[in-house]
Image (tube, rainbow, N blue to C red):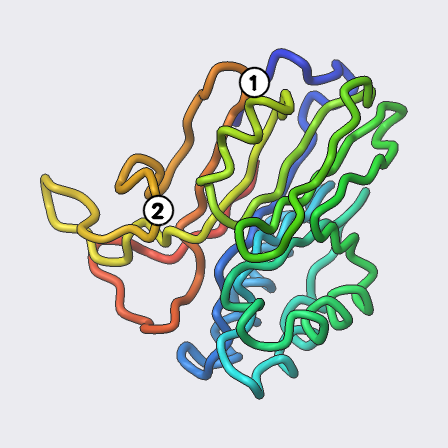
Amino acid sequence: TIALPNLPPEWDGLTILQLSDLHFVGTPSRDFYQWVVDRCMAEGVPDIVAVTGDLVDSATHHRWVIPVLGRLRWNEAAFAVLGNHDWWYDADRVRRRLSKLRMHVLNNRCQSVEIRGHDLVAVGHEGPWFRPAPEVPADAPGFRLLLSHTPDNIGWARRNRIDLMLSGHNHGGQIRMPWFGSIFVPSGYSRRYDMGHFDEGGTFLHVNRGLGGKSPLRFFCRPQVTRF
């Protein structure tokens, strides 16, 4: 549960379900991902779904996108951005499948959606892999939600007055040692944003540990879905 200063009163209790870094490659099996989505739905249909990249990790597992994510339901809207692994494996193919599920595939742009009578400015930032970076009008009214696969775009988010930023990419390090934490994190900030939530001077950032990985090895770093 998070409290944000620019949240409209009518959004009190609004729920967001974030899924990140599924890395469809065959391990874990498709049954695992379907079980995760079914469990999420059993705990309540969220108002907003946010998918923050790295869905596929092979040239053949695009076919899992619709059977797995097609089990999701939402009350208001669903948004998605891609990550670097999607960039490697036919990004346009991933986008087409997400669009078939009636998700707003944001790419590097912003889109205004009305939620409970108030504007939500949903922004996608798929950099540094997909360019150019999005442009957010300075006078764009409404609460600003950013989906960025990597948390390394936090500086851009602060400059553009993002209220809530949802990211993944770092997997919590996947291997975490007791009393030490993560060992390797693919970030220019090293381990600073490996997982968890951060109040960054007006921008609230959450970094999801993700559900999968190219190498499906995790140690003291369980897979994660986040419900706000």
User: Could you say where residue 199 lies in the image, as x and y percent from the top left?
Assistant: 44, 21
- Residue extending farthest to the left is 179
Query: Disc 1 vs disc 2: which is toward the camera?
Result: 2
Q: Is residue 36 left or right of residue 14?
A: left
Label 1, on which residue? 3
Height in image: 63 above or below 155? Answer: below
Residue at 63 percent of width and 76 percent of height:
90
Q: Residue furthest bottom?
A: 60
Q: Is residue 177 above or below residue 205?
A: below
Asked whether, in this view, residue 180 is left or right of residue 52, the answer is left
Give 32 or 83, whichever is nearer the viewer: 83
Task: Identify which amino acid the numbered label 2 is placed on.
Answer: Ser
Q: Which residue: 49% across, 51% down?
A: 225
Say what secondary structure mark 1 lies in.
loop
Give the x, y percent position of residue 13.
Answer: 67, 26
Q: Which mark is residue 187?
A: 2
